[in-house]
Image (tube, grey):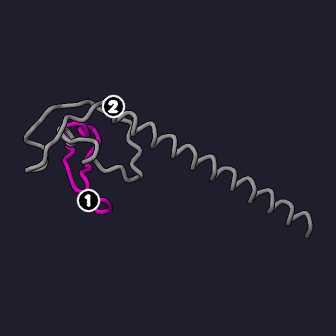
């Protein structure tokens, strides 16, 4: 089961666990309280809002996380990952082309 933890990079809340209970782990947090660091886990689980006032950080005001906002974050992350993938593919193609040209010279 997933549970809430604090990100070592930004100090905001994130989750750890199996990945099936992310929404419950982050329920009751505002988007400003949720870590957006790239964790490399690449989860494809749907986000849903669950109101759970007891899960919010003590003494802080929190608003329920909006599923659409979380989906927006997820889309942005996927777009960034796609851009990186394309850049890596381009670099690999240039490298292979250079290696082929170098082997033709020898």
Q: Kindly identify which residue carries mark 1.
A: 11
Horizontally, residue 38 falls left or right of residue 65, namely right
Q: Position of residue 55 (x, y in %)?
A: 12, 43
Pick out the residue farthest to the bottom: 106
Q: In the image shown, does 13 or 89 lie closer to the viewer?
A: 13
Q: Which badge, 1 or 2, is on the more N-terminal residue?
A: 1
Mark 1 against mark 2, which lies toward the viewer? 1
Q: Residues within 10 Å of mark 2 (few under 14, many from 20)?
A: few
Q: Residue at x 51, y 40 (%)?
A: 79
Left or right, residue 74 beside residue 79? left
The answer to which of 99 and 48 lies nearer the viewer is 48
Question: x%, y% of residue 27?
Answer: 19, 38
32 to the left or right of 38: left
Above or below, 102 against 72 in this view is below
Coordinates of residue 50 in the picture (x, y in percent): 18, 31
| Residue 7 within the magenta-colored segment of the rendering | yes
Residue reaching furthest to the right: 105
* SS at badge 1: loop
Q: Which residue is mark 2?
A: 46
Looking at the rendered image, the quarter that the C terminus falls into is bottom right
For the N terminus, the quadrant is top left
- x 23%, y 56%: residue: 6
**10 Å crowding of disc 1: few (<14), some (14-19), many (20+):** few
Label placed on residue 73 = none
Name the residue located 37 percent from the left edge and 53 percent from the top edge.
Answer: 37
Q: Which residues are magenta?
A: 1-24
Question: Looking at the picture, how far across and down is residue 83, in whole percent?
Answer: 58, 45
Give the structural element (helix, strand or loop) at label 2: loop
């Amino acid at each position: 089961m997933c549970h809430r933890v604090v990100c070592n990079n930004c100090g905001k809340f994130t989750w750890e666990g199996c990945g099936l209970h992310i929404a419950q782990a982050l329920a009751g947090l505002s988007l400003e309280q949720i870590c957006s660091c790239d964790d490399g886990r690449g989860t494809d689980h749907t986000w849903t809002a669950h109101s759970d006032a007891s899960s919010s950080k003590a003494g802080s005001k929190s608003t329920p996380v909006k599923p659409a906002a979380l989906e927006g974050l997820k889309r942005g992350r996927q777009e960034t990952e796609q851009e990186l993938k394309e850049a890596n593919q381009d670099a690999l193609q240039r490298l292979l082309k250079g290696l082929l040209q170098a082997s033709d010279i020898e």
